Image (tube, rainbow, N blue to C red):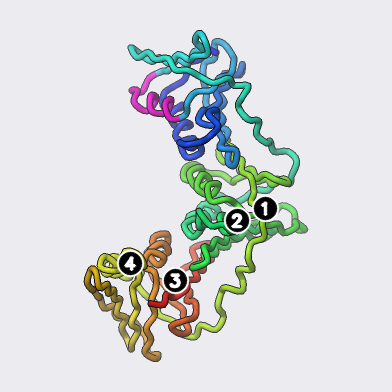
Amino acid sequence: MDLNVRRSDLLRELHLFQGIVERKNTIPILANVLFEATDDDSLKLLATDLEVGLRCCCPAKVSKTGSLTIPAKKIYEIVRALPETEIQIRQGPKGSVEISADEFKSRMQTLPFEDFPKLAKPGEGLRRLLPREALREMVTKTQFAITGEDTRFFLNGALFVLSAEQMRLVATDGHRLALVSALRKSEKKDEEETSVILPKKTLLELARLLADGDGDVQYESTENHLFFEVNGRQLISRMIDAKFPSYERVIPEGNDKNIEFERDRLMSAIKRVAVLSSERSRAVKFLIDKEKVEVVSNSPEVGEAKEVLFVDYTGPKLEICFNAQYVLDFLGVTEAGGINLEFKDEKSQAVLRPGSTDGCDYTYVIMPMRV
């Protein structure tokens, strides 16, 4: 292999691999990125942790085709530290690779590209187009609600439900539930509804890919794998083989009380008050009374704090306790404006919703704490 590539082109792609490659793994080859120089003057790159993989491509001047694997973290750090210039990547002696740019020269050991795992390819399932901006918003508003270390596999991912006219994404960790739905138009009116569980890491990497660019996302699901094609990059993921809980039962229907808060004002109050909450429970109380809500924290080891918010409420006096971080997670991904808190009593699950939908319907269910 012998090629030249612009530093900015290569850095852009290598940056996307940093979340894919695990720093600690028992299979050394998984710490490397597979480089493939092709005769159509392009450099193809591939990385995987066996659960999630990413295929990318960038333009290059290829003098000699070939394949090799390079340590993902080291090549990224080298390229990032270089000035904007042209980088030469050339296969060296005894399984090494030589990387040079201007006056900089380096040599790294590689691992045999034949040992790099073969990843699944699309082409066996139904391909569908997903509206990019709606999908990006759905991922942003649900991924934080996924637990990462639960022995119940179905909670380590988010349920993705796709029909001809709608797509939904649902995530829960057993204490809260985030549900976002958005409209889509399928080319096939009789398209069958499907549902899969997307692993948490898949959503994190999908969010990276959706952060920049435009155009629809091409999605395909096969028996065991999921494929998202975004701006010419392909994210490959195993799906979680489990049954997601009936999330519809968690969403309360009898919440007859409602308070509208100003989002920035509520978020600021909770942040300030939560400083003196218990570090273990992160509990803050909402003391709800006529035309006001007191946000209160109290910890014997730390101290106490409170802040009053004036609201339009004429119902009975109530005291509800929430995990401050759970509420802040929701407020952090909603736009400025009105936030509605719907509740029934001190023990039943409450619901937070943004005042305006802005294209996506967002429902956030949160269980009160008992302290």
Question: Residue 151, relative to residue 109: is it above or below?
Answer: below
Q: Earlier in the sequence, mark 1 or mark 4?
A: 1
Q: Earlier in the sequence, mark 1 or mark 2?
A: 2
Q: Residue at x 25, y 75 (%)?
A: 307
Residue, disc 1: 241
- Amino acid type, residue under disc 2 in the picture: Phe
SS type, badge 1: loop
Q: Earlier in the sequence, mark 4 or mark 3?
A: 4
Residue, disc 4: 267
Residue bounds of the magenta highlight: 73-85
Q: Quadrant of the N terminus?
A: top right
- Residue 262 location (% of width, % of height): 34, 72
Q: Residue at x 44, y 34 (%)?
A: 15
Residue 326, can we see it?
yes
Do the CB atoms of the residues marked 1 and 2 lie less than 8 Å apart? Answer: yes
Q: Quadrant of the C terminus?
A: bottom left
- Amino acid type, residue under disc 1 in the picture: Asp
Residue, disc 3: 355
